[in-house]
Image (cartoon, rainbow, N blue to C red):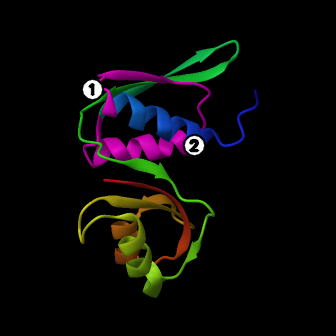
């Protein structure tokens, strides 16, 4: 079976492991985008840590969960967003104001929607977590 969306598979593994109360989960295969999303999740406290390991088959990531993830997922289709339309997508994907994060791919890299608002950047929506 082919993996069509690596990020969707990785985030669903995180969600399923968190729902079952597990403390660790392995993500295989991994990518630079998944690693950047994991950096942001760690910065915001949704995961404790992660470690990338290379094998002859590719890169896999071992993630230690903190138990703070209620829901996580990708945003499909990947909507383009301007500075004045962030609120519309916050209402759509997050349960309450100032609760959770939406990850956005901008010209400054992958950042959360709060940083994008501060930097006056638009971009493409990738994922959400709360």
Location of residue 41 with respect to 25 vertically, above or below: below
Along the line of sight, which residue is nearer the eye, 28 or 93?
93
Label 2 residue SS = helix
Horizontally, residue 17 falls left or right of residue 55, namely left
Mark 2 and mark 1 lie on one chain; the one further toward the N terminus is: 2
Q: Is residue 78 magenta?
A: no
In the rendered image, which residue does mark 1 sit on? 21
Along the line of sight, which residue is nearer the eye, 79 or 56?
79
Q: Residues within 10 Å of mark 1 (few under 14, many from 20)?
A: few
Identify the residue at horizontal 70%, vertical 16% (top origin): 57
Identify the residue at horizontal 37%, vertical 76% (top origin): 117
The residue range painted magenta reads: 19-47
Question: What number of labels is visible?
Answer: 2
Give residue 7's position: percent from left, percent from top.
57, 43
Where on the picture, by quarter, is residue 103?
Answer: bottom left
Q: Is residue 41 visible?
A: yes
Horizontally, residue 118 falls left or right of residue 109, namely left
Q: Is residue 32 visible?
A: no
Give residue 2's position: percent from left, percent from top.
76, 31
Give residue 89's position: percent from left, percent from top.
44, 74
Q: Quadrant of the N terminus?
A: top right
Label 1 residue SS = loop
Location of residue 106 with respect to 81 vertically, above or below: above
In the rendered image, which residue does mark 2 sit on? 7
């Amino acid at each position: 079976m082919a993996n069509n969306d690596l990020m969707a598979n990785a985030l669903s593994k995180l969600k399923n492991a968190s729902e079952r109360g597990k403390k660790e989960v392995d993500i295989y295969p991994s990518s630079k985008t998944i690693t950047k999303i994991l950096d942001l999740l760690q910065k915001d406290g949704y995961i404790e840590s992660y470690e990338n390991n290379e094998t002859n088959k590719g890169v896999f990531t071992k993630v230690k969960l903190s138990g703070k993830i209620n829901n996580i997922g990708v945003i499909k289709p990947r909507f383009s967003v301007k500075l004045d339309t962030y609120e519309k997508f916050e209402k759509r994907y997050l349960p309450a104001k100032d609760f959770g994060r939406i990850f956005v791919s901008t010209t400054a890299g992958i950042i959360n929607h709060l940083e994008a608002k501060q930097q006056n950047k638009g971009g493409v929506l990738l994922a959400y977590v709360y």
